[in-house]
Amino acid sequence: MDKRYYGQFGGQFVAESLMNTLNELEDAFEEAMADPSFIEEYNYYLTEYVGRPSPLYLARRMSEKYGVKIYLKREDLNHTGAHKINNVIGQILLARRMGKKNVIAETGAGQHGVATATGAALFDMPCKVFMGSEDIERQSPNVLRMRLLGTEVVSVDSGSNTLKDATNEAIRWWAKTAEDTFYIIGSAVGPYPYPKMVKEFQRVIGKESRDRHLELEGRLPDKVIACVGGGSNSIGMFADFLEDEDVELIGVEAAGKGIDTGEHASAMALGAPGILHGMKSYLLQDDEGNIQLAHSISAGLDYPGVGPEHAYLRDTKRVRYEAIRDDEAMDAFMEICRLEGIIPAIESAHALAQIPKEAKGMTKDQSILVCLSGRGDKDIDTVTGYLEGKGYKN
Ligand SMILES: *Cc1c(COP(=O)(O)O)cnc(C)c1O
């Protein structure tokens, strides 16, 4: 089997001029992962800079409400407030090891842009982040953060002026500058070896969760839930559970206004195999194969595709994929604020919204492990707008 593929998905659909670069990258990555000094350096920054290991918190009041133990993996407590930094630290250390001078990244909501800008400042590397002009307008606090951290935000005016277009532009720039430039991709997407690299750099989420759950409960969780945008926090959470056949794995996509409305981001539910951003995977597209705009109240889930390993895990049925609407996610968002004193990212609230559906028929000796991928400070304006629209008063 071609190691670049997950079943029929994945691959390297890039211009001929980038094939060499991808081969070099793969060699450097495999070498680094086999080098104890690289692993030690990566672990050092995860511990001392990111603040790992993150807690596995038994959400007491939610557990009582749903009649099953609910454990939350607190990726929201990482430096910069989400799981994305785990991957950035790994890739930027690899960039240094390869002797690259510059880093670039794409960003939609700006979360991966901020994580990359953070890593670039930490290691004193010039950084450009490509961002759609529409997103620059919508996500101004993150644009400011990137600039404060010393990163150049490059406005992309093409197509829908959003993430998909920013990613195309980043790949184009990379093809011209790959000699001295490393492209830090923000999710488990893109041409091989990116989906694998991102999985390995996010594996720490599931590994810590699994170890800690065993320590606390003497057994594995019954179900594991994570939200799926491109699929990095979820593949990191699932990685160490894939062989545990008794553990049910559930990925949650954004159903936006409902998957029958056309305004959603459920590439697994309604997408078809196609090619985008250097990979073959499930994508939202029309009958002619044009990529469609995704919609979700959560900017981080607003991507028209999904990582190729998820596409494979869907077809092989090792992971079950569900979709949660904006309104369901917002209800879960409000609930965890009030029950646990935790303001989650709206992305993470999609995973939380799946809990009541999964808890049915489970007992209080069983447990559900949920990846709380990030904190919600970044979403306060969205939440305010949503609640005002609902006529909510406090
Ligand atoms: C970016 C983001 C996501 C979605 O990205 P994945 O690659 O699917 O993990 C989920 N949660 C948070 C908090 C994010 O910032």
Image (cartoon, rainbow, N blue to C red):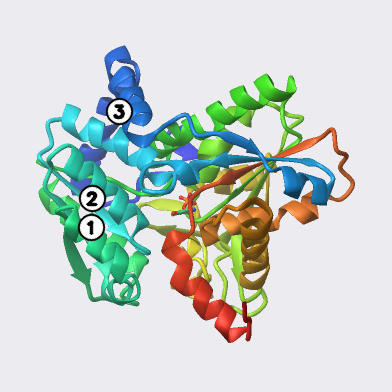
Quick check: marks 3 and 2 in contact, CB under 8 Å? Answer: no
Q: Quadrant of the C terminus?
A: bottom right
Measured as percent of width and height from the top left, residue 332 is found at 66, 61
Camera sees residue 8: no
Three-letter amino acid code at the position of disc 2: Ala
Q: In terms of sequence position, does the residue under pointer 3 or pointer 2 come before the other?
A: 3
Q: Which residue is mark 1?
A: 146
Q: Residue furthest top?
A: 36
Q: Residue, x 81% and y 51% (percent of image)?
A: 65
Residue labelled with disc 3: 29
Numbered disc in front, either 3 or 2:
2
SS type, badge 3? helix
Mark 1 residue type: Met
Whole-percent x, y for residue 52 in the image: 43, 31
For the residues bearing labels 1 and 2, Cβ distance under 8 angstroms? yes
Q: Quadrant of residue 265?
A: bottom right
Q: Secondary structure at mark 2?
A: helix
The percent position of residue 250, horizontal first and vertical second, equals: 67, 46
Q: Residues within 10 Å of mark 1 (few under 14, many from 20)?
A: many
Return the residue nearer the eye: 139 or 157. 139
Mark 3 residue's CB less than 8 Å from ligand 1: no
129 relative to 83, above or below: below
Would residue 197 be found to the left or right of residue 265 on screen? Answer: left
Identify the residue position indicated by label 2 in the image: 117
